[in-house]
Amino acid sequence: MSTKLQKLIEQRLAKLPSSTDAFRVSDGLQWPGVFIDALADRLLVSLRDTALPPELKDMLKATGRPVYVKRLDKDVKEPPLFLCGPEVPLRFVIRENGVLYLMDMGAGYSQGIFLDQRDNRAELRSLCCPGMKVLNTFAYTGAFSVCAALAGAQTTTLDLAQPCLSWCRENMALNDIDPDDHFFCKGDALHWMDRFARQGRKFDIIVLDPPTFSRDEKGHVWRVEKDYDHLVWLAAAILAPGGRILCSTNCRKLSPSAFRRMVSAGIPSAKLISVPMPFDFDGEDYLKCIWAQN
Ligand SMILES: C[S@@+](CC[C@H](N)C(=O)[O-])C[C@H]1O[C@@H](n2cnc3c(N)ncnc32)[C@H](O)[C@@H]1O
């Protein structure tokens, strides 16, 4: 007999192309504080301010899939723990619209991809063509870079963390892209964008999806709710004529209208198009995304 969880998985799968096996199964609506992602054959359960409901635990076991659980409400961010199902390697590959991404349940708090950016990755890929230059700032594992490179663009991938850049190179290689044909910059995004401006470099598309707070190279803390307009301003200075900036934040303190005002302040000449979250993220509307076009 099919459980409520299995029915949810089937409903989501029916709306996704067969080339996608990573998606949000449950977004806090069915079980408050419980978020479930399907990552290929694995399930990842994230808990915020709640314990795993016993009836859900039974349903998770009944799927026969490997299941991992992590907490979203702890100060110390820990990797997921194995809960039940067959023992499988920690490293594995998911598919999203036919693009392959390496996941790692043992890598830390995040497993390698932010599923809520799926539609933006697809849009970026559709906008890119050979000869275009794409800058992916705060790149994490470079999922946006992979999509741009698959469409023939030349990518520059920028992150503070060298392991993220190495992971991006692995993601490219998985998709038969030679990472040596692309650029990788380690360091602070603000510093690099300022440097690109002084060098007169321009990009056709820039992805700006930072964490809610970070530090610049001199140790100054910056926060999305205070400083996002400055980030957009730095990106606008290196945007080619007719270029686009994908402005995105998951900062819950910032309302959609306040975020739009900040984007507009950073690039007053641009036409702004807000885009919704993917259909499987049907709980809280936390992700704000705007395509700003010059
Ligand atoms: C929320 S993730 C970005 C997710 C990514 N845009 C994606 O869609 O996969 C934040 C990333 O920003 C990087 N980061 C944090 N502060 C940074 C800074 N000042 N300059 C460059 N990268 C930074 C982190 O190392 C991390 O990989």
Image (tube, grey):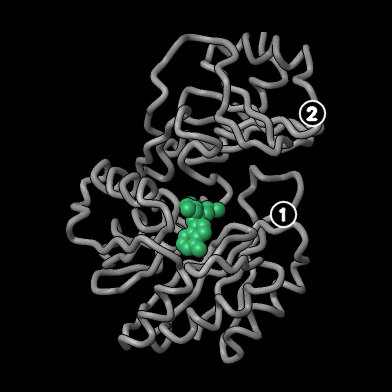
Q: Are marks 1 and 2 in contact (CB under 8 Å)?
A: no
Q: Does residue 42 appear in this view?
A: yes
State whether residue 68 is above or below residue 238.
above
Question: Which residue type carries mark 2?
Answer: Trp
* Circle 1: element type: loop
Mark 1 crowdedness (10 Å alpha carbons): few <14, some 14-19, many ≥20: some
State whether residue 159 is above or below residue 37.
below
Mark 1 or mark 2: name the one nearer the start of the chain: 2
Q: Does residue 120 appear in this view?
A: no
Is 73 on the left-hand or right-hand side of 173? Answer: right
> What residue is disc 2 on?
31
State whether residue 246 is above or below residue 144.
below
Gap in angstroms between the C-alphas marked 1 and 2:
18 Å
> Residue 214 at x, y = what percent?
58, 60
> Residue 191 at x, y = what percent?
44, 74
Which residue in the rendered view is the most extreme toward the front? 218
Residue located 24% across and 74% down the image: 131
> Residue 65 at x, y = what percent?
53, 15
In the image shown, does 204 or 96 lie closer to the viewer? 204
Question: Which residue type carries mark 1?
Answer: Tyr
> What residue is disc 1 on?
286
Residue located 55% across and 75% down the image: 231
In the image shown, does 241 or 14 lie closer to the viewer? 241
In the image shown, does 218 or 31 lie closer to the viewer? 218
* Circle 2: element type: loop
